[in-house]
Amino acid sequence: MTSPDHEELHGHTHDHSQPLELAPKTARRIKLLLASLVLPLILATVVGMAFLWPRSVPQIGSQPLLSEGTTQAQVTVLPATATCGQAGQAADESSVCAKTEAGESVLVHVPPEVKPALSEGSKLIVLHATQEQEGPAYIYLDVERTVPLGALVIVYMVLVVAVAFKRGFLALLGLAASLAVIGMFLVPGLMAGKSPLLLTLVAVSAMIIASVYLAHGISIKTTTALLGTYFGLVVTTLLALFSTWALNLTGTGEEFQFLHTAFPGLSLTALLTCGVIVAGLGALNDVTITQASTVWELYAADPQASRRGIFASAMRVGRDHIASTVYTLAFAYAGTALPMLMLVYMVDRPWVSILTSGQVTEELARTLVASIGLVLAIPVTTAVGVALLPGVGTPRGESSFTGIAEAQELGLGQREAYATQRLTEPNPELKLENETEPRGGKYPSRKRNHD
């Protein structure tokens, strides 16, 4: 229990079961400042989505999956030694024997590059020609993956919630909201001929707001991270525009060529720029949340530290995060580009020519642009967080418990703040609520509090 003297000194107790509030004047000042910065961004996002929302997109579903005289069916691959049909046909390098849902054994034409991945029991989606025609009656379309993919998604969601509890569940909601923005707003809008860059900026803004506030709640810490993420978004956008112009990138994949035919008015360069912006968003949000949390952890550990000292300490953490995240981006892009790199390596030409080829340059541009935006967002987020800290540098006796209370308002436990402060700069006046013996003596067992 908190001592009476402690309660008299601070005028309140620190109850983990109830949210702790900042001092009224400090809270009012910070809320007004953040509202003046964030509310216009939210309002602009809502107005932009209302103005750009794709209400009618005839291109969606315009390409039929099945041609006239064909149906879609599901079959199960039989053993390699099996024969098919009444004629007892055997499979060759471009076919497999399979059993239909009606129990009939049929010969399915399969691309040679796909057949090695198939085995007995594999479920295939095939096209069945219902009319008499030359060629095979059953043609491979795809592999049925509904059950294993659904199981993988369920395992992922269960693990996220099991490890992160409520925060993990809210993060999944934020992810679902972001995917909904992409699937219902961004992609249909691009197909409808909306401005690619404007559409992408509005969509990314909506994804930032949904993912940050749903996963981490509305607080000073998360709003600081939100502002840092917006700064990184601006830098990434400017660099993406410059890189696609300076490097003359127009899109080299087969999908770009098909889109050019299907959507003659769509700028492939603009589409590539939008892809670069969206690709760097996840890592950018990650580092800004981490930096905002670091600033408030340091403040909770030592509320009398100077702003310069907190900034320097937070940047030491940020520099480590920069190194690891840059690796993450580079490895992610390298992994997706492996098939393309193998094709590029087949051509006998100098290394410089390989690196400056269209396919490789696109991947390098994505990595470098996203990394630069990430690197610059870290000091900006840290500076914004430090500028918003209340009571920094005040006498210890006046602000130690206030600092911990404000840290708890942002989701930081008093015990963690207490332990960190003991390690960084011992404070004989700082006690836990249930600490009764003097500093240096033995302490009774402490009850574990949960935020």
Image (cartoon, helix red, strand yellow):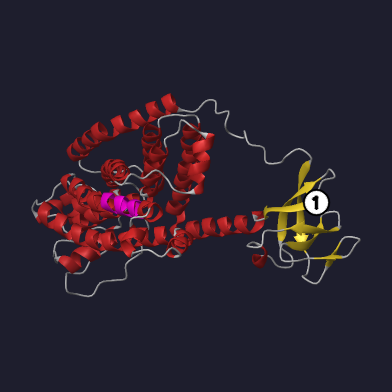
- In magenta stretch: residue 90: no
Quarter the C terminus occupies = bottom left
Quarter the N terminus occupies = bottom left
Q: Position of residue 399 (x, y in %)?
A: 14, 51
Amino acid type, mark 1 = Ala
Query: Compared to 219, does 335 lie above or below?
Result: below
Q: Position of residue 266 (x, y in %)?
A: 45, 33
Judged left or right of residue 261, residue 106 is: right
| Highlighted range, magenta | 364-373
In the depicted view, which residue is nearer to us: 306 or 67?
67
Residue drawn at x 65%, y 54% is 146
Would you call the spot at circle 1 few (<14 residues within 10 Å), some (14-19), or many (20 or more)? some
Q: Main secondary structure of the magenta part?
A: helix
Q: Quadrant of residue 90?
A: bottom right
Judged left or right of residue 181, residue 77 is: right
In the depicted view, which residue is nearer to us: 105 or 152?
105
Observer able to see residue 343: yes
Task: Identify the secondary structure beneath mark 1.
Answer: loop
Q: Which residue is mark 1?
A: 137
Judged left or right of residue 57, residue 250 is: left
In the depicted view, which residue is nearer to us: 384 or 189?
189
- Label total for image: 1
In the depicted view, which residue is nearer to us: 323 or 356?
356
Residue drawn at x 67%, y 37% is 64
Observer able to see residue 7: no
Query: Compared to 387, does 193 lie above or below?
Result: above
Residue drawn at x 17%, y 60% is 313
Q: Position of residue 448 (x, y in %)?
A: 36, 64
